[in-house]
Image (cartoon, grey):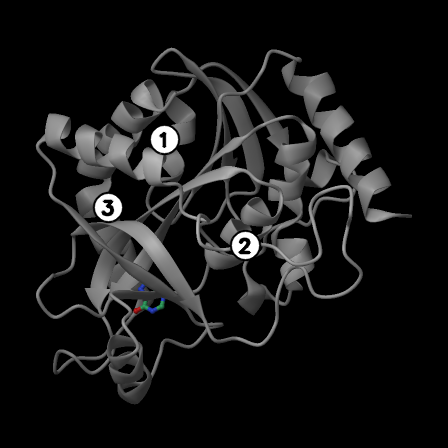
Amino acid sequence: MDLMDKLAQSADYIVGRIGDEKVDIAIVLGSGLGDLADSLEDAVVVDYHDIPHFPVSTVPGHKGRLVAGRLEGRRVLCMQGRFHYYEGWSLQEVVYPVQTFHVMGIDRLFLTNAAGCVNTSWGPGNLMLITDHIKLMGDSPLRGRNPDGLGPRFFDMSTTWDKAAQDVARSAARKCGTTLREGVYMLFGGPQFETPAEVRLARILGADAVGMSTVPEAIAASHMGMRTLGISCLTNMGAGILDQKLNHEEVLETGERVKGAFTALVREIVRTWM
Ligand code: HPA
């Protein structure tokens, strides 16, 4: 079956479950932020495995479901659990949900994640507004036959990270009294953390954070002309910066510690991003 037909079936199924009221913002909840979906009003939950053609997440601690509902008076659709390249999904599969959102008529995408901090002036627990990204991985979610129904073959990436949305995030951070760093997110494939040399390379290339998600979704969103905003929770210093080993527990612990501030910021952004 053609990609456009699959997307239409997925979109129809989701709309059939959550209703056809326009969704203002789709939010991808990264590690640590998943609970936010549990606080939606009038929530409707749709498990990924019930949606035709949807991939199903395998990472422990990542739920696999959409939660639609109301947050700060806006209608949102949250992804509780995303798909990562390191799980074995193709980048086409990783971005399938975002393409489905577009077909549903959603035009704002809010991506969140946990990331390693490469900028030595910052530290674990800082939040970072993604102003741009670097992807040296050869693959692209748009590799292969172009889905012309979604966007053009060759497309601009200079406005992938929406400037107006970044202003909304800055104002929201001021309102919340939260320091919001700004920088460049660099994608690594994972699941292994980067080597110290890779973290040095990332810094030399102009990256402030390293992570294993978000960029494919942003590329697909850009292809379709969606407005995209991204915020990283910097959960640990990148490998080799400190004289200690990295582990997933540290990532989860910092995510837990920052959750309150991150959630408050996300709420304020959702309230004000028009
Ligand atoms: N590297 C890549 N991904 C991550 C990291 C990291 O240091 N921390 C959280 N996600």
- Residue 169 lies, in percent from the top left, at 26, 35
User: Marks 3/1: CA distance?
Assistant: 12 Å
Going from the N terminus, do you reach mark 2 or mark 3 first? 2
In the image, farthest residue toward the bottom: 197
Residue position marked by numbered label 2 in the rendering: 156
Label number found at residue 36: 1
Going from the N terminus, do you reach mark 3 or mark 1 first? 1
Going from the N terminus, do you reach mark 1 or mark 2 first? 1
Which secondary structure, mark 1? Answer: helix
Residue position marked by numbered label 3 in the rendering: 256
Label number found at residue 136: none
- Residue 227 lies, in percent from the top left, at 47, 37
- Residue 203 lies, in percent from the top left, at 24, 76
Circle 3 packing at 10 Å, graded few (<14), some (14-19), many (20+), is: some
Q: Inspect the image, locate mark 3, and give the three-letter code of the amino acid beneath it.
A: Glu
Q: Residue at 52% of width from left, 75% of height from top? A: 137
Check the image and report above or below for 70 versus 131: above
Dot 1 beta carbon under 8 Å from ligand 1: no
Check the image and report above or below for 143 versus 104: below
Depth check: give the residue in front, 112 or 170. 170
Which secondary structure, mark 3? Answer: helix
Q: Where, by quadrant of the figure, is residue 208 drawn?
A: bottom left
